[in-house]
Amino acid sequence: MLTLKQIREDKEYAIRRLAVKGVDAAPIIEKIEALDDRRKAIQTELQTGQAEMNAIAKQIGQLFQQGKRDEAEAAKGRTAAIKERAKELDEQLGAVEAELNATIVLLPNFPAEIVPEGRTAEDNVIVKKGGEAPSLTADALPHWELARKYDIIDFELGVKLTGAGFPVYKGRGARLQRALISFFLDCNTAAGYTEVMPPLMVNEASGFGTGQLPDKEGQMYHVTVDNFYLIPTAEVPVTNIYRDVILNASDFPVKMTAYTPCFRREAGSYGKDVRGLNRLHQFDKVEIVQLSLPETSYEALDGMVAHVEGIVQKLGLPYRIVRLCGGDMSFTSALTYDFEVYSAAQDRWLEVSSVSNFESFQANRLKLRYRDENRKTQLAHTLNGSSLALPRILAALLENNQTPEGIRIPEALVPYTGFDMIK
């Protein structure tokens, strides 16, 4: 979440930056200012009362020494009244601080200065393109038809077992899925990321730490009896490994990668654009997470973008890198680059990765700090990216590599699959 300093230091700047995300922050910031002023006033009164009690305590001792018992007892009465008032003020302070924190978390992160203005995906900026789209025959099939033809993904069986959006991978489809996971993890660990295997359910504190709560609770599956949430991305448990941790500056960068299934309700999703693997409730994803010093976090972001680009290039997929506009960015992000691969049979671009810098927004919620050279604690920066999300990668691989003989497997994956064609 934003800090009070970020909000109050330059109110007009805060309002302008949040407007880039389509947020009218003025009413919320005015409420935050009023609550913060009230908080400070209560704290001042408490401090004044404590100072007065200290002075009276000293006075009472002197009065008893001087034999002025009646005056000393009267002073004790004043102390009791101040203590009672302090009790009332403590209760008021707790309520004000709770309301202040609940109001601050309503504000999204500031977008970075280079974030383009805009409200929808049409306003995003394409910063790079790579690869060449394949030339397919007129009878080329979309991946859901290829899945049926080669019996590698069973969508109907998934509906029987669970519901729509829960496909069953079979035979060489399952083997290809497993190969992609291993390939992505190997690429990440070779680049210095430490592999972790986190839980698939998290508590409320973890959901709050990375910004899924209270913003996206409707998009997560909630295990109500235990009050756990199924993870929408490995970002949540992996980043929370460092919740309430103080690092040293020499510990950075911290680089982690994890494979997990991901669970998203995707409420309201329907239509032709969500057919097959295009939008699922359960899907596999390999994630990369970095913790960084503030002064190097954008260098780290560039490195993560280049890393993901290298993986997409190894798969031989045509791709483009897109800088998201303010209105298309997540609640927590300061700057996001999306990777999209071209799906030839569908003739459309499919998002397969988002790589984001959250600056100190998540770290403030996580209380993730480090000691600088003066031993003062500062907020770290957090970053994450998909490296990569499997469903749409798999869809593009199947569609773009279909031939009359079968589906060709990219050379980089053959050591992992053990076969070079799906026939």
Image (cartoon, rainbow, N blue to C red):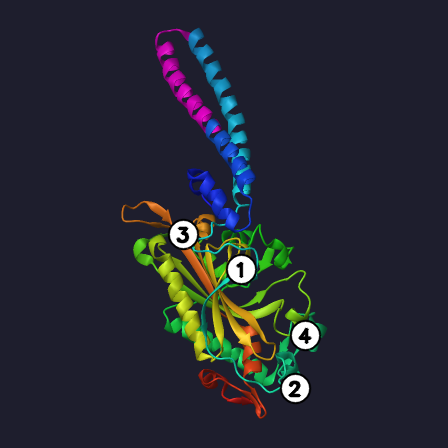
Q: What element carries label 2?
A: helix
Camera-side mark, 1 or 2: 1
Q: Residue at x 46, y 50 (%)?
A: 361
Q: Where is residue 308 in the image (x, y as percent from the top left)?
A: 44, 70
Pinpoint residue 386: horizontal percent, then vertical percent.
49, 67
Say above or below: 382 vs 105: below
Q: Which mark is residue 123?
A: 1
Q: In terms of sequence position, does the residue under pointer 4 or pointer 2 come before the other? A: 2
Q: Tell me which numbered mark, 3 or 4, is placed earlier along the sequence.
A: 4
Residue nearest the observer in this picture, 17 or 371: 17
User: Which of 318/183 is in front?
Assistant: 318
Label 1: how many residues lie within 10 Å, few (<14), some (14-19) or many (20+)?
A: some
Q: Outermost residue, left direction?
A: 373
Q: Mark 2 points at which residue?
A: 149
Which residue position holds label 3? 245
Tag 3: residue type?
A: Val
272 horizontally vs 261: left or right:
right
Instruction: Confirm whether residue 46 shows in the render.
Output: yes
Residue 94 in view (yes/no): no
In primary-sequence order, the first of circles 1 and 3 is: 1
Image quarter of the C terminus: bottom right
Region in magenta: 42-69
Q: Residue 8 carries which label?
A: none
Position of 300 with respect to 350 (left or right) is left
Q: Disc 3 on helix, strand or loop? A: loop
